[in-house]
Image (spheres, rainbow, N blue to C red):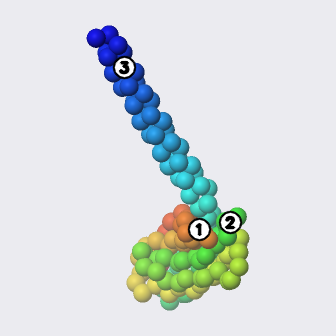
Amino acid sequence: MKKTSCLRWGLGIGILAIMLLCIAGVALIYFQRRSVSFNSRPLVLIHAPINHDNVMVGEGIPVHATAREDNGLRRMELWVDDELIAVREAPAGSTINLTLSQSWNPDLPGTHVIVVRAVSSVGVAGQSERARLDYGLC
């Protein structure tokens, strides 16, 4: 009776150890891929307009932004109020820096939110801080 009991305990502990090793392996792979994804996110900066700029009605608004990613960039996108305004594709080859310069004319006065996104060569997206623009509220 004791040999069977010890064998069952040993088998149970062995199965538990194998399960814990499998869980640890999956967790290691998950966190490693998450780290790679986070570290390959492009850095995106909006240089113009400055956050909370006031612009008169009828004026075009120049948007100037840059993006950088050591492993290369695919494209940059200009979004205003969750609407895609312009896309700049990276030239063929590996481009580390990319600049987007685009003029935008708002349809309505009010506060608009400008966001520039960039996509790295491995498909990971990064975006700028949101810039709020007060158009025609001067």
Q: Measuring from the top left, give residue 10's x and y in whole percent.
A: 40, 21
10 Å crowding of disc 3: few (<14), some (14-19), many (20+):
few
What residue is rendered at 62% in x and 71% in y?
A: 121
The residue where tag 2 is placed is: 71
Q: Earlier in the sequence, mark 1 or mark 2?
A: 2
Residue 6 against residue 104 in the figure, above or below: above
- Give the residue furthest to the bottom: 58
Q: Does residue 35 appear left or right of residue 19 in this picture? A: right
Q: Is residue 100 above or below residue 121?
A: below
Residue at image mark 1: 122
Residue, x 71% and y 75% (percent of image)? 94
- Element class at badge 3: helix
Task: Return the disc, 3 or 2, that comes first in the chain's sequence.
Answer: 3
Mark 2 Cα-neighbour bin, 10 Å: few <14, some 14–19, many ≥20: some
Where residue 72 sits, quadrant-wise, is: bottom right
- Picture quadrant of residue 125: bottom right
Coordinates of residue 54 in the picture (x, y in percent)? 53, 74
Q: Nearer the viewer, residue 21 or 56?
A: 21
Secondary structure found at label 1: loop
CA gap, disc 3 to disc 2?
Answer: 54 Å
At mark 2, the secondary structure is loop
> Which amino acid type corresponds to the residue marked 2 in the rendered image?
Asn
Measured as percent of width and height from the top left, residue 90 is found at 65, 80
Asked if the residues shown at circle 1 and circle 2 are in contact, with their CB atoms under 8 angstroms apart, the answer is: yes
Q: Quadrant of residue 98?
A: bottom right
Q: What amino acid does circle 3 point to?
A: Leu
The reply, left or right, for residue 96 in relation to residue 82 is right
Q: Position of residue 87 (x, y in %)?
A: 55, 82
**What residue did someone put label 3 on?**
7
Q: Amino acid at mark 1?
A: Val
Query: Which numbered disc, 3 or 2, marks the residue closer to the eye?
Result: 3
Look at the image and tell me whether residue 52 can be seen: no
